[in-house]
Image (spheres, helix red, strand yellow):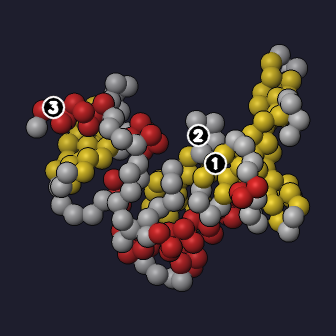
Amino acid sequence: MESDQWGGYISPETFEYSKKLKNKDLGENTIVLRKSKEFIEDIDRDIVKTEYFVLMGNKFKQQNKNWIKSLMAEFAIEYIDEHKCLPPKTNIKKTYKTSVRLLYVVDKYDSFEMTIKKDMIGNKSLDDYFNGLQYVKSSSPKSVKGDGKSWEVKGSKGKVYVVKKIGDKWTCTCPSFIYRGGQCKHIIAKQAEV
Ligand SMILES: [Zn+2]
């Protein structure tokens, strides 16, 4: 990449993102995010442009974001089938009748929505498929099985989040918990109460 460009590489097998390209990461389908600044006269400032490339047969081919999203959806299924959990930094965003939308958050600048349709998992029940996954840290509370306690907690901006305690595992539906994992302020506050 040239000096006024930056970006990183996503390994579709591990969903790991690295700013530096190590040779071992150069697998087929490695996804490249290339960022560059572009001056927009109308608003009199720079905006950051992101371009996407995929390593296909020793060549980096430019693709649009939707294409990348479908590729990642395929790799998400492979990951889930192999590891029986959601890929790192990936959560269930929304569940529909015939599809589930996952969100892979690369960092605070980039994220990818991946739609998993029923026919992509051999027409199995989406509920069974996703509910059967192991609980992974920073995944959404939907993937937590079993009974537990839950509380509605008001966030600082008035939004209501649900804090759950199942066994000794705590989850919250707030963005901080979902994207960063660990314990958010809502969990910490609840833990102090109970
Ligand atoms: Zn929270």
Residue pointed to by mark 2:
107
Mark 1, secondary structure of its residue: strand
- Mark 2 vs mark 3: which is more N-terminal? 2
Residue 102, relative to residue 4: is it above or below?
A: below
The residue closer to the viewer here, 76 or 64, is 76
- Categorize mark 3 by other alpha carbons within 10 Å: few (<14), some (14-19), many (20+): few
The residue closer to the viewer here, 124 or 17, is 17
The residue closer to the viewer here, 40 or 90, is 90
Residue pointed to by mark 1:
17
Outermost residue to the top: 44
Q: CA distance from mark 1 to mark 3?
A: 36 Å
**Residue 192: image tag:** 3
Which quadrant, please, contains the C terminus?
Answer: top left
* Left or right, residue 171 beside residue 177: left
- Mark 2 vs mark 1: which is more N-terminal? 1
Mark 3, secondary structure of its residue: helix
Residue 46, relative to residue 33: is it above or below?
A: above
Q: Amino acid at mark 2?
A: Asp
Give the residue drawn at x 71%, y 57%: 25
**Residue 177 in which image quadrant:** top left
Which quadrant, please, contains the N terminus?
Answer: top right
Outermost residue to the front: 23
- Mark 1 vs mark 3: which is more N-terminal? 1
Outermost residue to the left: 194
Q: Amino acid at mark 3?
A: Ala
Which numbered mark, 1 or 3, is in the foreground of this view? 1
Q: Percent position (x, y) of residue 15?
A: 59, 56
* Left or right, residue 81 beside residue 138: right
Asked if the residue at tag 3 contacts the one at tag 1, i.e. Cβ–Cβ closer than 8 Å, the answer is no
Q: Percent position (x, y) of residue 119?
A: 57, 79
Asked if the residue at tag 1 contacts the one at tag 2, i.e. Cβ–Cβ closer than 8 Å, the answer is yes
Q: CA distance from mark 2 to mark 3?
A: 30 Å
